[in-house]
Amino acid sequence: MTHEELVEIVKSKLEADSILQPGFEFDIIAQDFAGRIGLDLSLNSLLNDTAVNEQPQFDPSWLK
Amino acid sequence: MILDSIKETSRKIRDREISATEIVVELVHDVNKRDHILNAFASFNSELLLENAKLADKQLSEGKYSGPLHGIPVGIKDIITVAGYPTRCGSDLYPNRVQNSDAAVINNLRADGAIFAGKTTSHELACGVTSPPASNPWNSNYVPGGSSGGSGVSVACGYVRAALGSDTGGSIRIPASLCGVVGLKPTYGLVSTSGVEPLSVSLDHLGPITASVEDCALIMNSLVKKSGVDYTSELNKGIAGMRFGVLAGKPFSPMQPDVQQAFENAIDHLRNLGATCINIEIPELEHTLAVEFGIIPLEAGAYHLNSLQNKPGLISPSIRTLLIAGRVIPESIYHRANTGRKLISRALRRAFEENNLNAVITPSLPATAAKKDQDEFIFDTLSEHISVSYVRTTAPFNVSGQPAISVPCGFDSAGLPIGLQIATKPYDESGALQIAHAYATSTNWQLIAP
């Protein structure tokens, strides 16, 4: 996806949320967007773990 | 300047050796003298403070002793609501917001007799690691950390012995480490966040920043009202026979050489106190920031939607970009991050169980305080933004929800403080305090003031 395409996605999503403002730094927002997508992709190696569906561990019984 | 511990000050107040008013007069004098440079306080009402101190003294003279914090001034981060004080959250969004009710933690502190020294400087919307305009008390050209920077400064420079902070990715432990004081992020949900401006509700924690581990335990007793729980009761039991996992690899490396040296010295010291320290790598932790930064924008963006729609010009551009990210990135990122969170939490649990650990130990931060105009750290060949450097060692325990405490463990060659992080099992705050107290009282780091 090109930078210009990312900027368009950002603008359309912000318009849908009634957030679109002319003073926004769309280039920076689009770069940030791309960075976050890249960071998310780095999770692939973790999420390929076969035991994804085990229960979360905020379990007080752990203390015992 | 308050030099005595909370316990000793409390005894002196109760025995009428000193009055709350005398303490507050000295505090006001000190703040008037120094806070134009340090900016620990975002709002400081000396008249209200003196009024409350006089009331505390009057109550005592009438035989009404509220509790172990009677007449003790406590700093409150400016995202926590205190009736009658402005809660500005370091933001132009809330220039004059004064509420009539107290946050739940303020009710607890009030019930134990605490008085409120003022609202301490927060990074804008609790979303940052530098807390301008606050300055590091060890060198005012450096940042105090954030987002609870003013709380760290107010304790380190001796205005107060204790302050409250919040911690979503490290915002209690970062200023505690950079200012050379103690900071505890309790187990997720243990300390109520009711009446506190949220950043990211599933990662937000509230806790104390204090001058000593003992002070920290006393404040925890007030924040967590549970019958039979006394966080001071285990402090002096030592750590002989305990087992600690020394976390190595990413995200804890790389770190500055002075931090590495201080950390290795601390591990040696823990061994000398009778603990067994074993090196452990948990590969899942490398993904901590992808999880943390996958959750915060969506939760923060949802909370601040109205401000984004109606007052976006009152949010600084960098924070606005983060909040906007929460509106534009796909929800799948949030869900994947939460799945990653489960896996990281499970990996930490497994490490504790398989190695029979009492705690894991890390440097609180990989670097000491940055200069105010500094954007990046250079670690050998790696260039890293300071907000990433400061969060990567603390955020694993926001993600897992475990308690984690930072205690001072040395200084770098420029004289800036270094912190040691101790994380225990969920709800084992007593264990974290016990280990931290054993370390702190057998070294002199927590006694050194700027």
Image (cartoon, coloured by chain):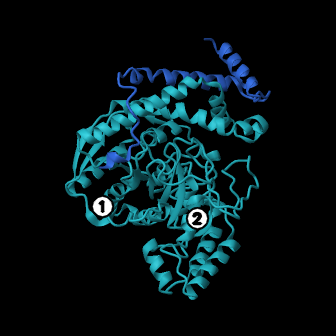
Chain colours: A blue, B cyan
Q: Is residue B265 above or below residue B203?
A: below
Q: Nearer the viewer, residue B387 or A9?
A: A9
Q: Which structural element holds mark 1?
A: helix
Label whose residue precedes the other's in the sequence (2 or 1): 2
**Is the Cβ of the residue at disc 2 closer than 8 Å to that at disc 1?**
no
Q: Which structural element holds mark 2?
A: helix
Q: In which chain is the residue bearing label 1?
A: B
Q: Nearer the viewer, residue B232 or B131?
A: B232
Q: Say whether residue B87 is left or right of residue B106.
A: right
The residue under the point 75% across, 37% down is: B312
Q: Say whether residue B421 is left or right of residue B24.
A: left
| Label ID, residue B107 | 2
Q: Residues within 10 Å of mark 1 (few under 14, many from 20)?
A: some
Q: Position of residue B13 (x, y in %)?
A: 50, 81
Would you say residue B407 is visible in this rendering? yes
Q: Is residue B146 above or below residue B282?
A: below
- Respond whether the residues carrying marks 2 and 1 are from the same subunit: yes
Would you say residue B412 is visible in this rendering? no
Quadrant position of residue B297: top right
Type of amino acid at the residue the image marks with label 1: Ala
Q: In which chain is the residue bearing label 2?
A: B
| Label ID, residue A12 | none
Quadrant position of residue B216: bottom left
| Label ID, residue B438 | 1
Q: Position of residue B191 (x, y in %)?
A: 50, 54
Q: Is residue B63 above or below residue B91?
A: below
